Amino acid sequence: MRFSSLAALVLSLLIVACSSQQKVGKTNTQVIANLKAHVQYLSDDKLEGRRTGSEGEKLAMQYISSQFSSVGLAAKGTDGYYQPFDVNDGKQINPGTFFTINDNELNAGKDFFPFPYSSSQKIEALPSIAIQEIEMPWFFDLKDVLEENKNNPHFDLNDYIYNNAKKAKERGASAVILYNSTATDDKLQFNAKDKSAPLTIPVFYIHKETAQKYFKDPAAALTIKFKADIGEKKRVGHNVVGYIDNGAATTVVLGAHFDHLGYGEDGNSRNTTTDHAIHNGADDNASGTAALIELARILKQSKAKNNNYLFIAFSGEELGLFGSKYYVENPTIDLKKVDYMINMDMVGRLNDSTKVLTLGGIGTSPTWGEAIKTTHSLNFIFKYDSSGTGPSDHTSFYRKDIPVLFYFTGLHTDYHKPSDDADKINYDGQWKIIQHVNSVIESLNDKGKLAFTKTRETQTSTNASFRVTMGIMPDYTFAGTGVRADGVTEGRPGAKAGLKTGDIILQLGEYNITSMESYMQTLGKFKKGDKTKVKYKRGKEVLEGTVEF
Ligand SMILES: [Zn+2]
């Protein structure tokens, strides 16, 4: 699951309390034991957080494919069960890069580096360090600019270098060569994630010792040869795909992503400490992956044979739905014959007292409402989100006009933290969800191909567009009025106003907070430094505090 923005899961909520009292059927202890084994294996430290393209991903792939195989699924990837795909990982310094001074070859990375926006022409020149001649490389000592901005918190050296190089080009430089003759650490290094537009000249940084050796005498003339060769850095992720061929005209797709954050290298962790900790992702999404394997076992034996069944364990989800986007662009079955897609992402934290289960994508087919109504509720309290878009892989299928249904037991304080561990999983709850998915599939067996309907888009405005934040983690599954804080960050405006986990925000300034949507709209009305009253509910009490953004 990935919430790239706070607004990504604004649910249009409708609570349906099903009061059906039918018997649920005996708990299948074997399935629960299987689920436990899958989650425990996938979220073991040995897999190091299943980061896309890592060794841990490989171990997870092997596990899932061997499970698919033992369940009796046919391989339906492009390489057996696997479907490899590229993940763009930014830029890299290719081996074609070199820099020589007076015929001494410098070591890329150690003695120098090219900036990622460098152009790639090969240059040979005899410049003088102190003179800026037209069509020649220009040298810049960062000394002055570093000293001038020593106490300027808004100064961004990388920004300065980029803009300065652009100007130098306009004034006639054929390349820019930077060095730092001061003792101040400039912290410059090759930044693979730099997305600056490419320049038409190469820009190099020469490390301190090397610069001292060659650039000491500003009057010296040097023979330099260099070339910056910047390439795309790629990682390979793998979907794992299995198939039950019932010889049917249509196919149901079942999906769950199995990748997670690794050590948080991709910047998507919510870990607040600085330790290099493994993010085990037991709920996100070993839980859905385990459910996918057990559903495969059930559907292999199912009498509902009017569909074929395709099972996809996606990778690259946490980086931006890479695996599912790749699959829908490079499908291994005919997507036109897909009946519908069911996605399970974070299904391991069913709350036994609230029994809230979120179902997304309800608006993507007129048949969903009916199917849910006629299927045994298993005492779930459903929260419906009509949108076909959301923070997980069903979005990719919705975008191909396929009806989707999304199962989700809700956010929690361990979300995207190293503490999302297997001992916190509700395996009985997971088993109930599997039964629900299976009943929905059974109830649709004779209904033919589902009609598709377009839904509203989930708002995708990013956090960055909000000028202020409260520093709370909203509970997206909270069904009542207001916004319930599922976590409160110390030292932020919400905590300073007295808010604690579990409090429900009812009013900010003169604005009533009725939903996530109104909460976010309201936040948009404030700017940094504003002070306002916050009214919130704690238990039965209504309290007030002062928020300063
Ligand atoms: Zn996630």
Image: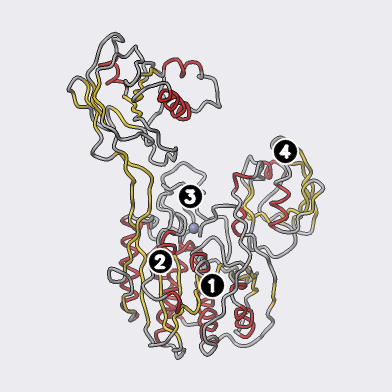
Q: Nearer the viewer, mark 2 or mark 4?
A: 2
Q: Which of marks 3 and 2 is nearer the N terminus?
A: 3
Report the quarter where the C terminus lies.
Answer: top right
- Quarter of the view holding residue 83: bottom left
Q: Mark 3 points at which residue?
A: 268
In this picture, is 215 found above or below 463?
above
Residue 18 location in percent, x, y? 68, 80
In this picture, is 39 found above or below 193?
below
Q: Residues within 10 Å of mark 4 (few under 14, many from 20)?
A: some
Mark 1 near ligand 1 (CB under 8 Å)? no
Mark 2 to mark 1 CA distance (whole Å):
15 Å
Q: Earlier in the sequence, mark 2 or mark 1?
A: 2
Q: Identify the mark at residue 327; answer none if there is no mark.
A: 2
Q: Mark 4 points at which residue?
A: 548
* Kind of residue at disc 3: Asn
Mark 3 to mark 2 CA distance (whole Å):
23 Å
Tell me: 462 left or right of 114. right
Labelled pair 1, 3 in contact (Cβ < 8 Å):
no
Residue 101 location in percent, x, y? 22, 21
Mark 3 near ligand 1 (CB under 8 Å)? yes
